[in-house]
Image (cartoon, rainbow, N blue to C red):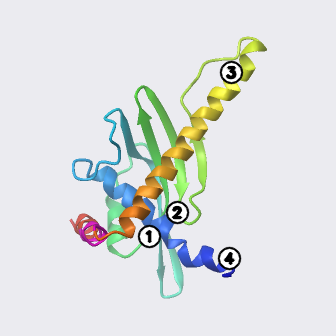
Amino acid sequence: MQDLSLSYHRYSFLGCEFLLWLWFCTSNPDSYNLFDNKNELIEIGNKIVLERNMNNSLEKITIKGEEAGLEEAMLSLKKGSIVKELNLLYKKEDKEWSFTLTGESLSFSNLKTPDIGFIESKKDVEGFVVEKMYLYNSIYSLIDNLYKNYILLRISDKWINITTNIKTWINS
């Protein structure tokens, strides 16, 4: 059996590639629809972290801000950087989630769920907790499903065309 830490490091690129694929799909919604439902949408949020290993020195680029342009991030991709973190906005019907996803481990941070109201009495506590757990679980399920779709594409014959399209997108 293979050592777990060895597997973690060997396949950690998949998470970073998944983030790049998500970014590509959100930038090309007409060509790559992530959802069957028209009431769902995922967008790039206000932070992208890229990393490039060059001559044994690590270069880290962070683009952050509400009105930050992605030109520097695209330039960094052209130079061979990989996406390490991606802040995402997920909208479903009238609800909106915001969270950051780390590529290496697919871990979540800064998860903000839609507002669900206030606790006005002790009776409301249980409902509040159940609703909050449902909202958290919605995002976990979303990423599980998107990652599953990515892996199924990754092992299919379609992946060659997708990588070609991603390279064209980066270099455009």
Residue under label 3, please give it: 127
**CB atoms at circles 2 and 3 under 8 Å apart?**
no
Q: Residue furthest bottom?
A: 55
- Which secondary structure lies at badge 1? strand
Please identify the quadrant where the C terminus is shown.
Answer: bottom left
For marks 4 and 1 on the same chain, the one whose residue lies earlier in the sequence: 4
What residue lies at 51% left-to-right and 52% top-to-bottom?
Answer: 144
- Which secondary structure lies at badge 2? loop
Name the mark nearer the viewer: 2 or 3: 3
**CB atoms at circles 2 and 1 under 8 Å apart?**
yes
Identify the disc placed on residue 36.
none
Please identify the quadrant where the N terminus is shown.
Answer: bottom right
Residue 123: image x %, image y %? Answer: 76, 13
- Which secondary structure lies at badge 4? helix
Name the mark nearer the viewer: 2 or 1: 2
Residue 114: image x %, image y %? Answer: 54, 29
Identify the disc placed on residue 103.
2
What residue lies at 56% left-to-right and 79% top-to-bottom?
Answer: 10
For marks 2 and 1 on the same chain, the one whose residue lies earlier in the sequence: 1
Q: Which amino acid does label 3 sit on?
A: Gly
Residue 22: image x %, image y %? Answer: 39, 56
Residue under label 4, please give it: 5
Q: Does the magenta stretch include residue 99?
A: no
Q: In this view, does 5 lie above or below 113?
A: below
Q: In this picture, which residue range is highlighted in magenta?
A: 158-164
